[in-house]
Image (cartoon, rainbow, N blue to C red):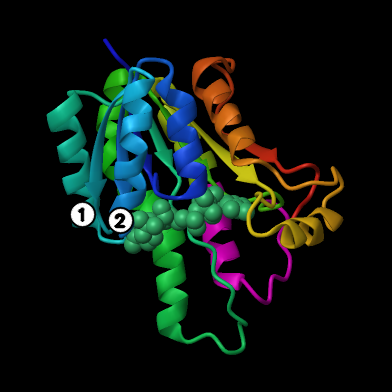
Amino acid sequence: MAQSILITGASSEIGRSIALELASGGASIALHCNQNLQAITELQPLLTARGCASHVMRYDLTRPDQAKSMLDEVIGLFGHLDVLLNVVGPFQYRDITEMTPDEWQEAIALNLHTCFNVTHHAQPYLCDSRGHIVNFAFAGVENIKAWPLSAAYCAAKAGVAVLTKTWAAALAPKGVRVNAICPGLVEEGTEAERKRMAEQIPLGRPVRPQEIAATVKWLVAASPASMTGSLLAVSGAWEY
Ligand SMILES: NC(=O)c1ccc[n+]([C@@H]2O[C@H](COP(=O)([O-])OP(=O)(O)OC[C@H]3O[C@@H](n4cnc5c(N)ncnc54)[C@H](OP(=O)(O)O)[C@@H]3O)[C@@H](O)[C@H]2O)c1
């Protein structure tokens, strides 16, 4: 039976790289986006060329009912779910002293509630398949410190780290593994912007999206069965 994989936020750069990396294993991949349908429909022929069946879906995952509809759609189509990749998590820069309650709630909903909503509705299927959940935080998430320009994003991702460890413990007896990838600064922008980024990173360059994708592939396909509840930095030794 082909592996069934759900990638939320497949329209993001990292989501797209993961889909391409996992496609070569003959999996069936459900690609989720919120607004950017074009990004995932453009991805589909590349996956087909690698022998991978894919399906595109558009849902606002801040809403629990939409997360449920998404899971119903995936199970209706593929019949089972082996791997859930919770990639959604848009970064937000906002000074904590200027942030409004609406902005706070939006950032927490996008970065924390989306992860809970999807996992909540996916867990029965992952228990059936003894599957794997991979969440996304950031390198340094475990250091509690002042993040004055991105407090809501960081608080939400600290929440994702807590959810990762908690679900890992709760679902381990059922054979489900839960880990989180913690990216550092990922390559983007112009050459000059990358150079500025590189100056802050001990390795001397930003992380490539393909490196995140390769880590995800190793995690779900080749890592030891006892590896669950881990926060895995892929960051060139940079921490936020
Ligand atoms: N890039 C980095 O340097 C970096 C560093 C550390 C951690 N990370 C983490 O790695 C992951 C991927 O990062 P990225 O930079 O590639 O992503 P990104 O470009 O910020 O993309 C965010 C994703 O969230 C989706 N989204 C937005 N609102 C949504 C909603 N209401 N419901 C459902 N989905 C929604 C977007 O969908 P649409 O575009 O279709 O609207 C998009 O796919 C994130 O969790 C991020 O926090 C990234």
Q: Is residue 231 left or right of residue 162?
A: right
41 and 212: which one is in front?
A: 41
Quadrant housing the C terminus: bottom right
Q: Is residue 166 visible?
A: no
Does the numbered disc 1 mark a residue whose Cβ is under 8 Å from ligand 1? yes
Give the image quarter of residue 123.
Answer: top left
Determine which residue is flagged by label 2.
61
Residue farthest to the left, as pictured: 76
Task: Please provide percent x and percent y for residue 157.
Answer: 55, 56
Q: Which amino acid does the dot numbered 1 rest on?
A: Gln
The image shows a total of numbered marks equal to 2
Q: Is residue 69 left or right of residue 22?
A: left
Q: Residue at x 62, y 82 (%)?
A: 95
Q: Residue at x 15, y 39 (%)?
A: 72
Does the numbered disc 2 mark a residue whose Cβ is under 8 Å from ligand 1? yes
Give the image quarter of residue 213.
Answer: top right
Sooner in the amino-acid sequence: mark 2 or mark 1:
2
Residue 141 position (above or below residue 192): above
Q: Is residue 27 left or right of residue 112?
A: left
Instruction: Give the residues drawn in magenta, as a range.
Output: 142-162
Task: Please provide percent x and percent y for residue 49.
Answer: 35, 22
231 and 23: which one is in front?
A: 23
Q: Secondary structure at mark 2?
A: loop
| Residue 187, label in figure | none
Quadrant housing the N terminus: top left
Q: Are marks 2 and 1 in contact (CB under 8 Å)?
A: yes
Determine which residue is flagged by label 1.
66
Q: Which amino acid does the dot numbered 2 rest on?
A: Leu
